[in-house]
Amino acid sequence: MNILFIGPYRQKDEWGRKSKSILRAVQKTGHNVTSRPIFLTSHPDTNSYMEACEFNISEQYDVLIQFLLQPYAIYDGRVSKRIGIFNTETMPNKMALGQLTKELLMDEVWTDSCFIQKGLQNSLDSYQGNVKVRAIPPVLDTTDLEETSSISIKASDRELDGRFLFYYIGNLAEDKGGFKETCIAYMSTFSSSDQVALIVAPEAPFPEEEVNKALEDCRACVGEIKHSLHYPLIKVIRSQNGLQRSERVALHVDSDCMVSPGYSLATSSLVLEAAMYKNTPIVNKGNACYEWWGEENLWGVESYEDLCVSRQRPLPYRFTSGESWQKPIIKSLGETMLEVYIDKFKRDKKAKANSKLRNYFNEPSLEIV
């Protein structure tokens, strides 16, 4: 079977990591795969490498897999099967036909969330489409993820010595990442007398004044009950070029617990990485990572379904009242962070379960029929 895969696998962001992971999983199926890179931003931060399968040539393809934004998806009648991967992060509730036109051009739509799979399948069926929505298991490309880190976060900052390290990686300006909830829960649960630290790592370059403002907004939410000297320690990794892969790996290796309570229902490659490094991430119970693995590997936070009300919209119809996501309950997040801190027995048990994940990700996990 000849497969043509199109996706942003050269981008140095979540879209790129997920696209590359799925490309690797498709290659492990044993079929003949040709790939073509696309870029989903005007000024992408890209890897300069080229995939070997970009040089494969076939006169006829049997399957077309498109990992992109819906408006750019195409219908190609020359192939037997058209598969769309649209990185859907939210639950479709009541969506107009115009919002689903590209999905209806596909034979299959892949998502990594069973919740999204059911909701999207119901929406597509309501328009009498013949599209099958399929929930695929979590996949992760481990090619460039060495087992140990070449740098040390603790060695670069002696103030972190002897502390339990929580860490957050993401976009501080986006509501959906859960940064605000993370900081408020952390500040409300711990004080300066606790041997803990929260490392904040903006994934993309972020102005220092904006970082300071984001932290001050969180302190303002907690209020004046605690004097500023009583806030628990927060450290920000500041990088002019954004968080590098080596720094990301160092965070996974050196830190104790990744906090990732984002609103998205889809899997996060960063959470998958953290778990693979025997870290035990905190995620929403509505998140696809928790759907697949649960309490054996992760810490689950109670969350609630809410409408997608957000100013950050990559496309006009994304994150509308026709969709919903999962917001973390701050009280539950704080209680979970405290449990992670004090319950070494549970941490070790989850870490032992996660020690098997590197082998799991290196094995074939997709089937294309």
Image: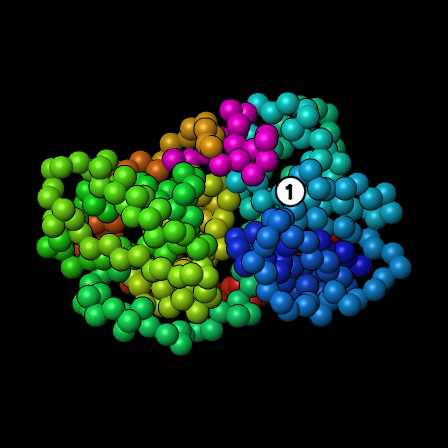
Q: Relative to the observer, which residue lies in front, 369 or 215?
A: 215
Q: Secondary structure at mark 1?
A: loop
Q: Is residue 216 above or below residue 271?
A: above
- At 44% from the left and 69% from the top, the residue drawn is 246
Residue 88 appears in which quarter of the rendering? top right
Q: Position of residue 207 (x, y in %)?
A: 38, 51
Residue 25 appears in the picture as rendered: no
Image quadrant occupied by the N terminus? bottom right
Q: Relative to the observer, which residue lies in front, 286 or 237?
A: 237
- At 46% from the left and 61% from the top, the residue drawn is 241
Per the image, the residue denoted by label 1 is 69
- At 72% from the left and 42% from the top, the residue drawn is 73
Q: Which residues are magenta?
A: 312-327
Residue lying at the far right in this picture: please name it. Answer: 59
The kind of secondary structure the magenta stretch mainly shows is loop
The amino acid marked with disc number 1 is Leu
Q: Relative to the observer, which residue lies in front, 227 or 262?
A: 227
Total marks in image: 1
Residue 186 appears in the picture as rendered: yes
Q: Position of residue 348 (x, y in %)?
A: 29, 63
* Residue 349, magenta (yes or no): no
